[in-house]
Image (tube, rainbow, N blue to C red):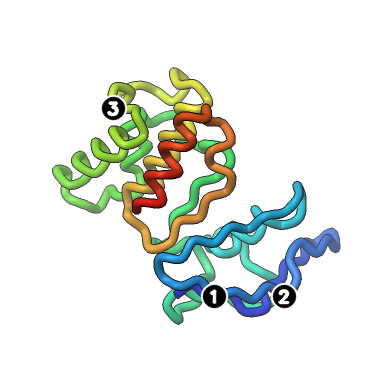
Amino acid sequence: MLSLKRVGKTYPNGVRALDAITLDVAPGEIVAVIGGSGCGKSTLLRAVGGLDAPTQGSIALDGAPVTKPHEKIGIVFQESRLLPWLRVADNVGFGIEGRPKSERQKRVSFALDRVGLSDKAGVWPRELSGGQEQRVAIARALVPRTQELLLDEPFSALDAFTRVDLQDHLLNL
């Protein structure tokens, strides 16, 4: 269970991005945070993902505090944030280096196939379109098989057909 208790975030410049958010998310539950630009959605996801500490309140996963990036929490950002010095397959497998090579290759191959980019495994990120880059980022988030998956508008750079296909895939997971 993911649990947020009175989570708040005030930036050093005085901007209050989050105010006393309390939320429990049960396993298998899908939650959407909706709001206008600049209302704190990404700030909330960064806090839940352990990337940015809240200034008030607490965040816990299965009773353990989340105070830094957590192996059970995956994140897909609005931008792909691929590592330009790694080819596509290595970007996808970046978070599972400690696994046996055969398992890593199998997971990476499955994820790339699922997002329709098996043929791009050996290319550099600079050779991809924006939508392809985002699909690589989504594949990278799926490979570790995390308990929680945080999505910060990951489909915004995708065409309508690919968007629907990946949304269906995530629902099946």
Position of 72 relative to 56 (above/below): above
**Quadrant of the drawing holding the N terminus:** bottom left
Q: Which mark is residue 20?
A: 2
Task: Provide the residue designation for mark 1.
Answer: 24
What residue is at 66 percent from the left and 69 percent from the top?
A: 54
162 left or right of 94 in image: right
Farthest left residue in view: 102
Are the residues flagged by discs 1 and 2 in contact, CB closer than 8 Å?
A: no
Front position among marks 1 and 2: 1
- Image vertical order of residue 22 relative to residue 30, above or below: below
Q: Nearer the viewer, residue 22 or 16?
A: 22
Q: Nearer the viewer, residue 122 or 18?
A: 18
Instruction: State the CA–CA distance, disc 1 to disc 3.
Output: 37 Å
The amino acid type of the residue labelled 1 equals Asp
Estimate the spatial distance between the alpha carbons at disc 3 and disc 2, rounded to whole Å: 44 Å
Q: Residue furthest right?
A: 14
Q: Residue 69: where, in percent of width, then height?
A: 48, 61
Q: Residues within 10 Å of mark 2 (few under 14, many from 20)?
A: some
Residue at the image point whose x is 77% and y is 66% from the top: 10
Per the image, label 1 sits on a secondary structure element best described as: strand
Instruction: Give the labeled residue for mark 3.
Output: 118
Q: Is residue 2 left or right of residue 56?
A: left
Q: Residues within 10 Å of mark 3 (few under 14, many from 20)?
A: some
